[in-house]
Image (cartoon, rainbow, N blue to C red):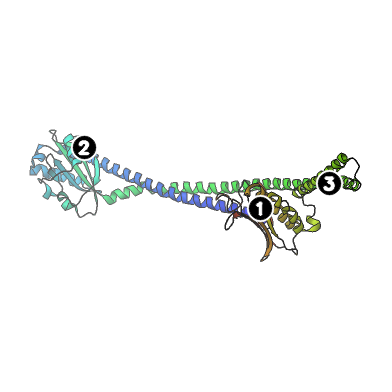
Amino acid sequence: MARRHGQRTSGRWAVLQFSLAGLAALALLAVLGTLQLRRLGTDQALSNAKQLTEVLGHSVIEPIIGPAVVRGDPAAIARLDRLVRAEVLRPPVARVKVWALGGRIVYSDEHRLIGSHYTLGNEETDALERGSGQAQADVTDLTRPENRFDRFAKKLLEVYLPIHSSTGTPLLFETYIRYSTVAQDARNFWLPLAPYLLGALFLLELVQVPLALSLSRRISESQREREELLRHAIEASELERRHIAADLHDAIIQELAAVSYSLAGHLEHPPKDEALAETMREAADGTRRTIRELRSLLIEIYPPNLRAAGLAAAIADLVSPLEARGIRPTVSVPSDLELTDAAESLFFRTAREGLRNVISHAHARRVSLVIRPVEGFVELTIEDDGRGISVEDAPGVREGHFGLRLIRDLAEDMGGTLILERAAKKGTRLRLTVPVR
C-alpha cells in the first residue's frame, strides 16, 4: 500500500513537473511570439511609412518641381510651399526636405534651411546619385546640424526617396514622421493578434495536461500489473522451493541417512575382506558428505527451520557455509525479536540474497550480519570488506539487481526501505528497514 501511494505520488509529481515545464515553455513561446509579432508590426509600420513617402514623392512633389524650384526662385518655392502645407504636412508627417546633389537643400517647410549645404549620409548620397530606387527609412539623428529645427520631437523617422525634377534633375525627397505614430501603427498591427497567439498556446497546454495525466495513469497501471506478475512469480517460486525442499528432506535425505546408518552399523562388525571393508567405509563417508551437501543446498532453496527454530537459527544455517569459502562471518540476531511471518520471511530472503551477492561478487574476507530494533523499526545490515560497488550502483538498488529489486518492492509494501550503498571504509552495505507492527 505504501509503495502504491508512493507510485501515485511519483506519478503526480511527474505530471506536475510536465505541467510546470509546459508552462515554462508556454511562457518562453509567448515571449518569443510576442517579440516576433512586435517585430512584424514594426516592419509593417515602416513599410506603411515608406509607401506614404513614395505616394507623396511621386504623385504630389515630383510633378510640381521644375527648374525654377531647383534654382531657388522665390515664387516657385512659394507655390511648392503652399502645396506641401496643403497636401503633405499632415499627421504623421512633421517635416519635409528636398535635396539636390552636393548636399544643398532645395526646399524645406522650415524656410531657414532652404539653400543651405550639409553633408549627406552615404545611403542618402547613393540614392541621390542613382536617381532611382525604393524609399528607405531610418531613425533621425537629431544632433546633426540640418536637423537642429526638428528637435521639438523626441524621435523622428526619416524616409527618403529619389525623385526627379521636370527636366530630369535627380533630387532626394525626404519626409520626417513622428516615431510615436510608427509605434502606434505597429501596436495596432500586433496587439489584436497577440490574444490569438496566447490563446492557442494556452489551449495547447490545456490539451497536453490531460494527455499527460492519462499517460501517467496508464504507465502506473502497467507498472502495477507488472509488479503483480512479479509478485505471483515470486510466490510461485517460493511455493516450488518449499515443495523441492520437502521432497529433498523427506525423501532423498532420509533415504541417504538410512543408507549411512546401515553402512555405519555394518562397519561395527566389518567383513574379513579388507577391500570390501574399505569400500564400505568410503561409501559411508561419501554418503555422509552427500547428506551435508544436500542439507546446505536445502538451506539455500528454503529454510526448513525458519518457522520451527526461528530467524536466528535459519540465518545461522545461511552463514555456516561461508567459512568453507574463506569468508569469516559475524552474526548478531536478537533471540527475542517479535516479527510477523511476512517480516520474518522478508528478513531471511534479504539475508540470503545479500550473502549470496557477497559470495558471488564481493571477493570479501569478512562479512557482518546484524539485526537490531531501531526506534519503531527493525533493521538488517549486511556489510562486507570486499571490493565495493561502483558509483553508478550506490545509493539505492539498480534495475540490474533483480533479486534485490523484488525484495525492495516487498519492503516498500510493508512501509520499509532497502538501500544498497558503499560501506564507510571499504566494501558494500545492504540495509533493510521495516517498521514494527
Badge 1 vs badge 2, beta-carbon distance below 8 Å: no
Give the residue at mark 1.
408
Residue pointed to by mark 2: 58
Question: What crowding class fits label 1: few (fewer than 14 Cα within 10 Å), some (14-19), or many (20 or more)?
Answer: many
Tell me residue 281's x, y (percent).
Answer: 84, 44
Earlier sequence position, callout 3 versus callout 2: 2
Q: Quadrant of residue 418?
A: bottom right
Give me the residue at 72% from left, 51% from top: 321
Task: Give the amino acid at mark 3.
Answer: Ile
Residue identifier under label 3: 253
Q: Nearer the viewer, mark 1 or mark 2?
A: 1
Helix, strand or loop for disc 2: helix
Asked if disc 1 and disc 3 are in contact, CB closer than 8 Å, the reply is no
Q: Quadrant of residue 348?
A: bottom right
From the viewer's side, name the closer residue of 202 and 45.
202
The mark closer to the camera, 3 or 2, is 3
Q: Taking 366 as reference, is 256 left or right?
A: right
Q: Determine if residue 335 is in view.
A: yes
